[in-house]
Image (spheres, rainbow, N blue to C red):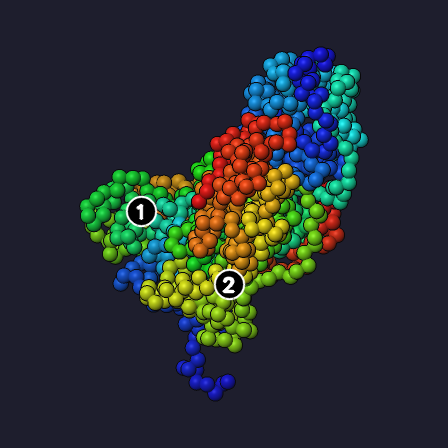
Amino acid sequence: MSAVPPTATPKTNRIGLPRADYEGGKSTLCLGCGHDVITKQIITAFYEMGVEPHRVVKLSGIGCSSKTPAYFLNRAWGFNGVHGRMPSVATGAMVANPTLAGIGISGDGDTASIGIGQFVHLVRRNVPLVYIIENNGVYGLTKGQFSATADHGAKLKSGEVNELTPIDCCSLAIELGGAFVARSFSGDMKQLQSILQAAIAHKGTAILDVISPCVTFNDHEGSTKSYKYSKDHETPVHEIGFVPFFEETMAEIQPGESKDVRFPDGSLVRFKGVGRDYDPTDKEAAMRAIHESYAKQEILTGILYLNPSKADFSSTLNVSPGSLVNIPLEKLRPTPEALAEIMESYR
Amino acid sequence: MSTVVTEEGLRVAGAREVVFNDFSLQVATANGSGSQTANNVLMRSIFQMGVPVSGKNLFPSNIQGLPTWFTIRANGDGYIARKRDLDVLVLMNPETADEDVRTARTGAIVVCEQKLGVHTKRDDVLFFPVPFSELVVKVTTAPEHAKLRKLIVNMLYVGVVADLMGIDHAEIEKSIAKQLKGKQKAIDLNVNAVRLGWEWSEANFPEKCPYRVQRMDKTAGKIIIDGNAAMALGYLFGGATVASWYPITPSSSLCESFIDFAQDYRKDPVTGKLNAAVIQAEDEIAAIGMVLGASWVGARAFTSTSGPGVSLMSEFIGLGYYAEIPAVIVDVQRVGPSTGLPTRTMQGDLLLCYYNSHGDTRHPLLFPCSPEECFDMAHDALDLAEQLQTPVFVLTDLDLGMNNWMADPFAYPDKPLNRGKVLNAEQLNELKEGWGRYKDVDGDGIPYRSLPATNSPYGAFFTRGSGHNERAVYTERPQDYVDNVDRLSRKFETARHMVPKPEFQERGSKHGLLAFGTSHWGTVEARDRMERDLGISLDYCRLRSLPLCDELRDWIARHDRIYVVEQNRDAQLRTILRDELPEYATRFVSVRQYNGLPLDATTVIDGVVNDAEIASAKSPAGSLKAVSGDAAEIASAKSPATRSADSPANGNKESNP
């Protein structure tokens, strides 16, 4: 083995897989689409976290964002469902086999309009799933209509102005008991990567609302989801350092003016202040900060709220923690005596 | 006291012989008045006396106050379909008493609250007026019992009816003890009330009801259970591990029963954790989505709902069909369209389910007719869904799902779970790139699938509702699309040989009856009555599933005229038969009932004898022609009864093709 020259050995992760094993098909989205940036970060995050690809299920609904599971983790099982209903499919899958690692990709139309009902109940149940909203404020595949996350006063290319109140998926998720609620921007790759890794470590629903500009239909002057606007208005509430359970050291952020939140598996998120007083474990403060950011036209980013100890859905249902898929028949089918007992009760 | 029995009433009663073990009894109460226990006690007591019996609850969509009726059919020969003519009425609801009396048939027996005064309103009906409201005070003298009067009064009519009809007091006490499960104070209170009713009736009604219960031995070993509980047990023993549902009448008690059974029989004794997950979803769309997600990773999953739920599920069901994901959907049918009559029964979702979702789709449907079959077909449906990798419907209805049915104890299922064509890691590693998720290797249209978490680099594939080729890759190529949907057609052809076969009962006739699900019960009774009373002999086929199989085609080919009995307006099964067997399209005569009430035999007899073909065939003998214009008279020729009010001509129609 040692005879192989070092240059020929591809770099591998902690389970010995090369990055190529986490890649997917070629994207068919528009050149420069924010979604493709997120896809790359997802590949990196699963690679860095050393998740076995065959244990991953990647689910989506319908829309540009929902196409992206085809562009990462080819060795994971993909499920492209119906519009707005990915959460229910994910719920069934994750309850049936909680040993899977689930990632759901949705968009602002798929989540905040047609899928708002399923989104709401996914969060309430705390189904273990990384749920990414690739948020660009418009419907891409149907050519640029406003979505429900479009800001009040935002302008379409045609000049049409949005007069309706936007739905803020982050404050909604916090309100519903979401235990991992983050917002990021596809132009802030470093922050997005830390959040993604922390989301993978989180056992419960991790909501990531990622501003992901649509270069074709919503990147113009007057848009509030353009690259320029997002860059100008992004306001990180902290710097995030994530140390997975299998690593010892904190490379980026030294202890000091920081707050540590530990996950049950031993992973750690270290938050460093960036000149404002923000406690991501304080639910009310998080809600207040988000509400205040509207008036200031700030796009708050970071892990806005975190509570890693909340019980996940299978625990709430009191279901066996292992997979329900291959339980042997003798454990599933009650005995003849049990049937006789049941029959007797109906005599 | 009994002087209120009028001369005409006595004449009617006196003219009639005492009838043993053949009657229908209907109790009219208000919803939420606690009469369910009393009615079940009556039904069980008759059952315990060995007499075949059924109980049907005709209730409103309401929790408290609206009228509700409970009908008991007892029949020594085992006919337990709803009977159109009511023989004995117990009128406890002042709101409906006038109308119930007005529409009672001549010669009916009516037990009623004396102070309602309805017993003076007809002289061709035999009344037994009872001062229930005075009597109930006597058994509830304790101050803590005063508030229970509304409930206890029901046990008084149980006592009165028991005396009038000869129901064994000991059996009543036994069934009260069973219903109240060892709550001794409640048992005593109820038994006392029954006793008072009994004694009062004994002292005041020297003349008894002409319809009597007589001990026999036709129910030994049998159970009484509703179809929903029976089917929940089927899923328990059939290895279901995930159930997802949204509450809807008449299906709610199916998953609720499954929850109870899982708590008792699926709990790990060591960890206390369940080997089953039941999720109450936010709506039916989510319920089916969860079933598809769970089935996709390899769990045996089902949902139960009713018509409105299936309407909501349609988009996902199309995905299940096209992406080939197992799913079991129980549709406990109720009266549509829209909200319809949500607490009444119908077989109105055949077309909705068979062709469910947009585009070209078709799904297997199973039709249990009894609790035993609910139990068996739950398992069959799970197996079929996994074998065929497609959504499978089980269609019952409110009548079967929510009412109490006599049944044989369920046979212990000894067959293994059939998980269908699932590749494990070893097989995948061997096949490598040779495997295609949607490749028809065996020529039966059924491809091989892999399950998430299978540890093989060759196992993963992309499930999508958009166009895909046999390697599960996105495609819009015309030929790929055609190849794929043609294979799905082949798969459906395979399903023809896998679904439960029909049951045939031959009597050597060139004419036949064809029914499915709960229509079975009224149909077989009609067949026997027609043979006995009218000399019309008919073969019978009970369809147990769709798609149609070869045996059914052969049976149809052998019969010139086939009466298709179903409980919907548009002859939905006949539509499917005509479509799939166009060469026999003119042989099907539709017989239908769609008034929300369970099918009665008289409707079927009317439908057959009104059919011109059979009438003219019989006419040379002269026995049928003269009366064929009025089938109702033929049907009721044996008894002095006329139509009762719950069976208006409307909704009991028959038509020829």
Residue beneath the point at 63% across and 15% down: B123
Query: Residue A40's quadrant in the figure?
Result: bottom left
Give SS at disc 2: helix
- Return the mark for residue B494: 2
Q: Could you say where residue B247 lies in the image, as x and y percent from the top left?
A: 53, 40
Identify which amino acid the numbered label 1 is placed on.
Answer: Ser
Q: A71 above or below A168?
A: below
Q: A257 above or below A165?
A: below
Choose between B3 and B376: the one closer to the eye.
B3
Residue beneath the point at 40% across and 53% down: A82
Q: Give neighbour class at mark 2: few <14, some 14-19, many 20+ (Cα, 10 Å).
A: some
Asked whether the viewer can see residue A115, the reply is yes
The answer for which chain carries disc 2 is: B
**Residue at mark 1:** A147
Asked whether the viewer can see residue B252, the reply is no
Residue beneath the point at 71% across and 48% down: B409
Q: Could you say where residue B379 lies in the image, as x and y percent from the top left?
A: 61, 54
Give SS at disc 1: loop
Q: Tell me how far mark 1 sits from mark 2, CA to CA.
A: 45 Å
